[in-house]
Image: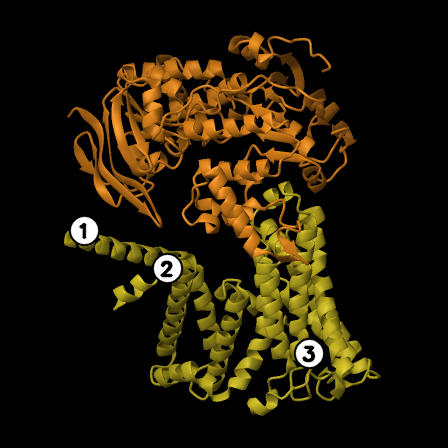
Chain colours: A orange, B yellow
Amino acid sequence: MEYIIEMLNITKVFPGVIANEKVTLQLRKGEIHALLGENGAGKSTLMSILFGMYQPDEGIIKVKGNEVVINDPNHANALGIGMVHQHFKLVHNFTVTENIILGKEDNKLGFLKTKAAIHKIQSLSDKYKLKVAPNALISEISVGMQQRVEILKMLYRDSEILIFDEPTAVLTPQEISELMSIMKQLSKEGKSIILITHKLNEIKKVADRCTILRKGKLVSTVNVNETASEKMAEMMVGRKVVFGVVKQPAKIGDPVLKVENLSMASNNSEKMLINKVSFSVNRGEIVCIAGIEGNGQTELVHLITGLIPHKQGKITLNNKDITNYSIREKTLSGIGHIPEDRHKHGLVLDYNLAYNLILQTYFTARFQKRGLLKFKNIYQFARDLITQYDIRSGQGPYTIVRSMSGGNQQKTIVAREIIREPDLLIAVQPTRGLDVGAIEYIHQQIIKHRDEGKAVLLVSLELDEVMNLSDRILVIYEGEIVADLDPKSTNENELGLYMAGSKRGEVGAS
Amino acid sequence: MLAKILNYINTSEKRINIISLFLAIVTGLLFGLVIMIIVSPRDSFPAFLTILTGGFRDIGRVLEIATPLIFTGLSVGFAFKTGLFNIGAPGQLMIGAISAIYIGVRVTFLPAPIHWIVAVLCAGLAGALWGAIPGILKAYRNVNEVVATIMMNYISLYFVSYAVEYQLYDLKNARSLTVAKSAQLPYLGLDKIFTPNTVNFGFILAIIAIVIIYIILEKTTFGFELKAVGFNQHSSKYAGVNDKKGIIMAMLISGLLSGLAGAAIYLTDSFGRHLETTEILIAEGFNGIPVALIGFSNPIGIFFSAIFIGFIELGGFYMQRYDLAPEIIDIIIASIIYFSALLILFRGIIIRLLKHNRFKHKKREEEDG
């Protein structure tokens, strides 16, 4: 009875892929167990099996020593298994309490017993120091608190086993450390936690043991405090990984992008989403826009790339006024764009890999003649890029992109954007949700692009990425640039203060 | 045996689709048989046999029934591929029909080949216009194309009723006037192959349309753009594709195809079909939807599904000599559609069978090795 959950020799096969092959995961009661692996390593599949969304082809699952077949998520809940999904599943115009009791509404003669629920939520919140106000509307609370509501949902259902799927992806540094202490508190109270992540420093901070998967197979289960981060990274990727970013000092040239007094009002209120933003990006430098999610980064990038029609202000590229250019004209005049949402904007998921690689260039003489596609060139181009950028997929250029792993989808976009050699590369959270191996790779590509004398505008929420990669940091807060910093003379704390709006700097008109 | 067949078929999407479609057709036919047995136990089996074989008695007639279905099937399927649901095929067909008839009856100074060519072109243009209007509304005002095309159907229906009654009325037969001989679609020698001679140039035009639509969708940059907009409007916009133009062009072409169906049906002699003032939407229009569904919106698939539906419709026609109503055929077609809507279920079953099979194979290999 040492293990509360045992997944023994789990095998799960999808058409063309073996997602899990004889994977074993054993969770002790009261431990925090990290599940580490690259994208496509089979972490999500394994957890989906535990949560009853898939049935394993082979292998058995034991809960508290008894063999079980988990049919669906409700069944998993009944067995005491709860999950905090990466994308929260909350009703935004409901209160915290309403969201928590949703699906498990206790009633008397059809009337909700809200008072009792509020009481229970309040006491749970106090016990685990979650600081959640039961009557607040979801739409009015911070992302961090929304996550704590998700945690409360599980606690309210008396879950014993809590699965966290990449919980820190959307949090600020301060919120991350709060979450870490909450997780420790939970495990102290006897809850068992599975933490899915690829951030090694988080594993180091909270986890007791760590199970590492690679390409669907179990590599090892290790004790975290006896294993160095480098060792774990190596086990995950299958080779040595360079930590930190190695780069030469920037050789700054002429300005490429100049943004002057860019403004944009919100559609349904007087609020300015972008407020008189001016900055420039020069050849040979990586300028990073740092900020907490939702402070105008998306709008700013969409204004520059043309996805949002231009409102006020002026945009120049290589001394040419491109303010009123169409998206295609902007692309052709030298802008590459790695979009924030790769599924919404970056890829046509139902097109194959080759088609996605020519998404902005299909009309050029290389790929068409009199309106007819030149398939030979298209597939040759795709094969070249696949080799050059190491894009892995089931059927090469013919693979439908939807079936590829997130990391390889992102590599596809990076390859497509960089191969066009744009003077300005706009990369929005280029490594979101990727594993160390892919992050390292994409960082190298971005630096290489800079070293070739191009300009890079990077938008990132990850402080590590901001500090390591950029040559200059612009902090955005509520649609305004509030600081222009040199990464060498600042630190994460100062950056955090600017990002939270509690400090404002002088912004030089550079 | 089954294992062998299943083994031959790999998990490729297309093959699974075809098998599940086959299952849907068989289930649909059996469902029809069950109803026939309930209605008339004595006649049901010979009548069912007639449905299955009746089409062979007159292949020419099968092709004739299939011709407009190919056009409307292509119309709906093309729109599908570009992410649009064109329910307006009947309206586009009727507006095309009335244009063709008008040219055929009133513009009689044109000589023979030019006359019918102009009539066909006008039918296509009118259909294209009728399709483009919902397209424009969708592109610029985000009006749901399903609602807009349904409304356009009724505008077309009553406009056609009016036009027949007050402009092109044949009092003696209570229907639209027959088009001039020079406007009737020529047989081009097809009457020598198929007797009685009912297959005309319309069928050839349908084949040409299949080829052109296939090339547009699969081989051109234009098709690349249209399908990209259909799959994901956001990423097409990101890629610099003019998504509004794409939507309008897709609806325009879709409407054009339905308009041509109108020409194919009504540019015929006095024994052929004529527009009436009964205010009913022409069945071939809506039947384009099942044809496209059964053909997976693929131009070649649509060809076969139109032929199939023509085939069992003719079988149903011959079945009438038994004590059964020809509406049985509509029930069968409807249930095939219904079962193809459950394709996902069939697909699931097939995939499971395949995997099970492969798994056993793998195990056997492991044991052998």
Identify the secondary structure beneath mark 1.
Answer: helix
Q: Is residue A368 left or right of residue A155?
A: right
Three-letter amino acid code at disc 3?
Leu
Q: Chain of mark 3?
A: B
Q: Residue at x 55, y 46 (%)?
A: A356
Q: Residue at x 54, y 12 (%)?
A: A496
Q: Residue at x 59, y 69 (%)?
A: B211
Three-letter amino acid code at disc 1?
Glu
Residue B64: x percent and y percent? 58, 81
Residue A483: x percent and y percent? 64, 13
- Note whether residue B285 is visible: no
- Note whether residue A7 is visible: yes
Q: Which one is nearer the viewer's eye here, B29 or A234? A: A234
Tell me which label, 2 or 1, sits earlier in the chain.
Answer: 2
Mark linked to residue B366 = 1
For label 3, the residue is B275
Q: Which one is nearer the viewer's eye here, A229 or A111? A: A229
Mark linked to residue B346 = 2
Spatial CA span between label 3 and label 1: 68 Å
Q: How crowded is the residue under tag 3: few (<14 C-alpha within 10 Å), some, or many (20+)? A: many
Same subunit, tags 2 and 1: yes
